[in-house]
Image: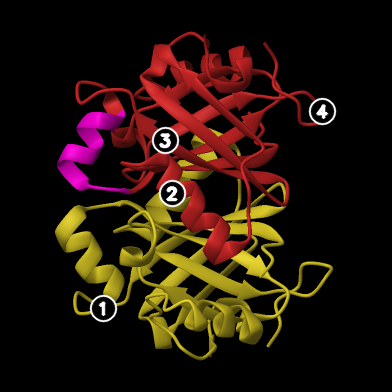
Chain colours: A yellow, B red
Amino acid sequence: MKLLNLDHVAVAVVDLDAAIAGYRKRYGVEPLHREVVESQGVEEAMIPVGGSYIQLLRPLGDDTPVGRFLAGKGEGLHHVAYAVPDLDSALAHLEEQGAALIDREARVGGRGARIAFVHPRDLTGTLIELVELTADGRPVS
Amino acid sequence: MKLLNLDHVAVAVVDLDAAIAGYRKRYGVEPLHREVVESQGVEEAMIPVGGSYIQLLRPLGDDTPVGRFLAGKGEGLHHVAYAVPDLDSALAHLEEQGAALIDREARVGGRGARIAFVHPRDLTGTLIELVELTADGRPVS
């Protein structure tokens, strides 16, 4: 198991345009990429900061994971994603340890990347995403 | 205003040794730095991941910001910190905009760095820390 980088920190928001405008005004940052990821029930905007991203997540409906998060907790930090060079071997390592995996196999997330989530109950109450990246930081799809 | 990097994502934990052991076992990562920061009421461990850190925060007592966070929400993501090249000018920019600053002037945080916090109510429910770093990524004290 090797973590290459802190790929992104994800923030659940109610209004994606307002959130993007807020980050632009306060911190002078701008999304590089924006897309609807139907399989995760979100529209996401990826704002580059150094070698990482701020990921803003707007739920596509109330009955989605991010919609339920917003209803329960309001806007705020949702998960953190680490880049790994080989997601299948990372998942095998975690499964061998009995980690509380949400995804036992890779699925496709934003940017067409192979991703998997580990449940917050596994470690420090933190929803962790692993995303497979190439050595030069591009998503593997 | 310019954000150089995502410096760290901070996680509030009850047991710092257990959390460090958990990150070691699950993700093969190791703290580079550990210290008590009395002024913030925490013991912190900084785990490098690429050019960023996972910061694990254990409160020194129940009546501290992180102690109250744990009592209310349990373990989990606490704040995100961005590196800036000039904290005083960043704070002047935010104050000019009427941002909800927790610190109107820089104070000294972990690693002896000059830091300041922006209240979660300011933007997307997210507690944001700004930390002044040199061009080669060292804290400015």
The span shown in magenta is: B66-75
Between marks 2 and 4 in the image, the one whose residue lies nearer the viewer: 2
Q: Amino acid at mark 1?
A: Thr
* Residue B93 shown left or right of residue B49 in the figure: left
Three-letter amino acid code at the position of disc 2: Ala
The mark closer to the camera, 1 or 3, is 3
Q: Spatial distance from mark 2 to mark 1, Cα to Cα?
A: 30 Å
* Chain containing the residue with disc 4: B
Q: Position of residue B82 (x, y in %)?
A: 58, 36
Identify whether A110 is placed above or below B107. below
Number of numbered labels in the structure image: 4
Label 1 and label 3 in one chain: no
Q: In the rendered image, which residue does mark 3 sit on?
A: B57
Who comes first in sequence, dot 4 or dot 3? 3
Mark 2 — residue? B19
CA–CA distance between discs 2 and 4? 31 Å
Q: Secondary structure at mark 2?
A: helix
Residue B5: where, in percent of width, then height? 67, 41
Of the numbered discs in the image, which one, if any, rests on residue B70? none
* Residue B39 place in picture, x, y as percent: 41, 11
Image position of B17 (left or right of B30):
left
Q: Is residue A87 left or right of residue B12?
A: right
Quarter of the image where the C terminus of chain B is located: top right
Tell me, for residue A64, which label it has, or none: 1
